[in-house]
């Protein structure tokens, strides 16, 4: 048996379902290599173990490492000029239809070399990690051709090699129609279905996403992409019902989607389909705020249907340029009326499920990966309460202090 490390005198929000917050007032964690060997009240520590190292956390709050389950972290340039245009009255959809929006980030991404893409994505990942994040999802979607999508996915993979961070990659080639396919959306979808097996063969893809929207792709086109994913055994997820009710969530649920994301315009049938399929609803208050949306996602109905609610940054240059997951907890409470406990569940247990990682991440339990954050806070409800402040003292990732 390899060496044990004891982390004692902690106030634990384990995020298991044993108690609100999975709370343990005076808790301890025993880690063994990258895993949690034992978690519980310090008074119940199993006898006869001789941990090789011991850390007194002085009563600090400990939570699972946070999980940002929806980001678009790899892109070139930024869209501050479009932000100014929107402040002067142009809408996000107007800008997209005029060839700006996602397409302008595609041009900047294609023009950026690998080193530039990597360095900018690395800086963004570090900003998320500083607030206790140990796992992120990264989508492609700003390359929109075979080579540039692959480049962006390789950058995402490289983040995991060079940083103490778990990265799940998602192909979002079906994000927008690239200019070379103007007027030929079906041909572009067909191209994606041919590219996917090649990206997958290189080990670049953990899941497949799409943008089912008036300014994105139709339900029928999204279905083609999902069928290609299914043929490869890859899980799917969807940007669904963000700007209009397309019925994308119901389609995604038919494919057993890990998550449907945004969901401001989700209807009752979509909620029911998600509940039946066990699909997670990923709420993105940053995009709601930055696009000045007024229609709220149907949180009460999702909750009543038992759909797990996750929260993510949706970091991207067009609709959510923020890099604070803690701010998203605050905004999920303020804008979407989640409770602080639901907000923390949304970036731990439910976020792990949205990435298909529930068996190994998202809560502090024996057998899971030893990813946890130590906070300068008294109570976990403070994670959603403060904003513009980083109370993270340090992070342990795969058993090692980061
Ligand atoms: O998640 N909805 C589509 N995709 C992104 C925005 C992309 C962009 O504007 O660059 C989102 O909000
Ligand atoms: Fe997104």
Image (cartoon, rainbow, N blue to C red):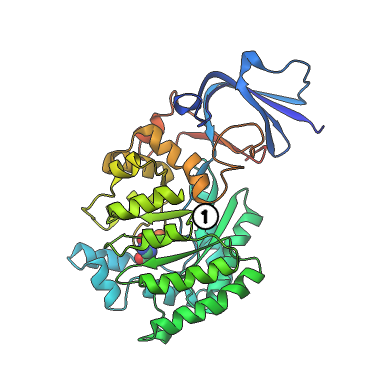
Image check: 264 left or right of 355?
Answer: left
Image check: 33 left or right of 169?
Answer: right
Residue 282 place in picture, x, y as percent: 40, 50
Asked if ligand 2 lies within 8 A of label 1, the reply is no
- Label 1: how many residues lie within 10 Å, few (<14), some (14-19) or many (20+)? many
Residue at 26% in and 72% down: 95
Residue 291 place in picture, x, y as percent: 27, 58
Which image quarter: residue 39? Answer: top right
Ligand 1 rendered quadrant? bottom left
Q: Does residue 317 appear in the picture of this structure?
A: no
Which image quarter: residue 206? Answer: bottom right
Residue at 39% in and 36% down: 342
The residue that label 1 is drawn on is 137
Check the image and report above or below for 100 versus 323.
Answer: below
Residue at 43% in and 41% down: 346
Residue at 47% in and 76% down: 144
Q: Nearer the viewer, residue 80 or 42?
A: 42
Q: Nearer the viewer, residue 380 or 82?
A: 380
């Amino acid at each position: 048996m390899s060496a044990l490390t004891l982390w004692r005198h902690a106030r634990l929000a384990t995020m298991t379902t044993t108690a609100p917050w999975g709370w343990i007032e005076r808790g301890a964690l025993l880690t063994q290599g990258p895993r949690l060997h034992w978690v519980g009240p310090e008074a119940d520590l199993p006898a006869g173990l001789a941990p090789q190292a011991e850390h007194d956390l002085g009563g600090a709050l400990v939570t699972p490492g946070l999980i940002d389950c929806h980001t678009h972290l790899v892109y070139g340039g930024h869209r501050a000029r479009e932000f100014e245009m929107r402040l002067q009255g142009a809408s996000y959809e107007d800008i997209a239809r005029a060839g700006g929006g996602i397409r302008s980030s595609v041009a900047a991404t294609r023009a950026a070399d690998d080193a530039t893409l990597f360095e900018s994505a690395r800086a963004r990942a570090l900003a998320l990690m500083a607030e206790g994040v140990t796992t992120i999802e990264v989508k492609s979607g700003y390359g929109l051709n075979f080579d540039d999508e692959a480049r962006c996915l390789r950058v995402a993979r490289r983040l995991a090699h060079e940083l103490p961070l778990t990265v799940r990659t998602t192909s979002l080639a079906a994000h927008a129609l690239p200019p070379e396919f103007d007027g030929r959306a079906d041909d572009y979808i067909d191209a994606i279905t041919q590219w996917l097996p090649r990206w997958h063969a290189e080990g670049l893809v953990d899941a497949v996403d799409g943008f089912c929207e008036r300014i994105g792709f139709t339900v029928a086109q999204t279905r083609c992409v999902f069928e290609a994913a299914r043929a490869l055994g890859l899980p799917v997820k969807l940007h669904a019902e963000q700007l209009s009710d397309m019925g994308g969530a119901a389609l995604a649920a038919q494919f057993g989607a890990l998550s449907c994301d945004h969901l401001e315009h989700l209807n009752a049938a979509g909620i029911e389909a998600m509940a039946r399929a066990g699909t997670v609803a990923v709420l993105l208050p940053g995009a709601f705020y930055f696009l000045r949306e007024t229609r709220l996602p149907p949180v009460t109905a999702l909750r009543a249907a038992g759909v797990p609610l996750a929260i993510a940054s949706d970091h991207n240059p067009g609709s959510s340029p923020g890099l604070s997951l803690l701010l998203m907890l605050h905004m999920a409470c303020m804008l979407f009326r989640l409770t602080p406990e639901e907000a923390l569940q949304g970036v731990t247990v439910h976020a792990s499920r949205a990435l298909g990682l529930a068996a190994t991440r998202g809560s502090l339990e024996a057998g899971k990966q030893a990813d946890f954050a130590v906070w300068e806070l008294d109570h976990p409800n403070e994670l959603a309460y403060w904003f513009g402040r980083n109370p993270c003292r340090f992070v342990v990732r795969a058993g090692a202090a980061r």
